[in-house]
Amino acid sequence: MKYTVDILIDLPRAKVIELFDNPELMPKWQPDLVSFEPLSGAPSQPGSKAKLHYKMGKREVEMIETIAKNTLPEELVATYETKGVYNLISNRFVATSDHQTQWVSENEFQFSGFMKLIGFFMKSAFPKQTLKFMNQFKTFAEATES
């Protein structure tokens, strides 16, 4: 399953990247994130790995993030793997003006085992969840300038 979502953030691209590329700030815009644990490599650099632990209601999810490409401020590509789910995300940041940035998130999911059924029946939920995270970041980032 592939999809693309995007939003406009009312901040210069440099500020968006400064906030986006800081793992310590992730809990401020991802309230379900319990922990971010670097596992190997230099953070945000290609090949680096980290473990992310989320608690969503009663459900707990751990995933491994692997940075595939980092050419920020233009693009950050990463994979996220958990049981039965492989997610490849390309995040691109386009300066639409001196004070506005378009964040484009291209997502590709591959499912295995039982998760194939979840992926099939909940197809529309995945783009909504991605957009929710993006809007949480937008709200957080724009509030840093107030």
Image (cartoon, helix red, strand yellow):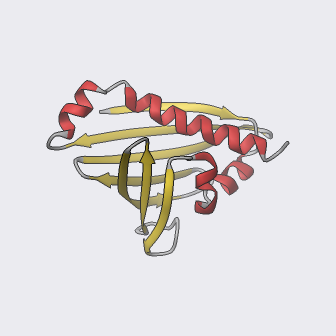
Q: Is residue 33 above or below residue 3?
A: below
Give 52 or 89, whichever is nearer the viewer.
Answer: 52
Q: Which corner quadrant of the image does residue 19 belong to? A: bottom right
Q: Residue furthest front?
A: 58
Q: Is residue 1 visible?
A: yes
Based on the displayed image, in which of its 4 quarters is residue 104 positioned?
top right
Tell me what residue is drawn at x 21 percent, y 39 percent.
115
What x and y, as percent, mark residue 125?
Answer: 38, 28
Left or right for 13, reference 83: right
x and y, in percent, of residue 94 in the image: 64, 41
Return the residue found at the far right: 146
Task: Residue 58 in the image: state x and y as whole percent.
Answer: 38, 43
Is residue 76 shown left or right of residue 58? Answer: right
Q: Residue furthest left?
A: 113
Residue 67 in view here:
no
Q: Where, quadrant-wise, is the N terminus in this rendering?
A: top left
Q: State the image coordinates of residue 117 (x, y, percent, origin top left).
A: 19, 32
Q: Is residue 101 left or right of residue 107?
A: right
Foreground pick, 10 / 52: 52
Residue at horizontal 82%, vertical 45%?
145
Q: Looking at the image, which residue is at 60% across and 34% down?
A: 135
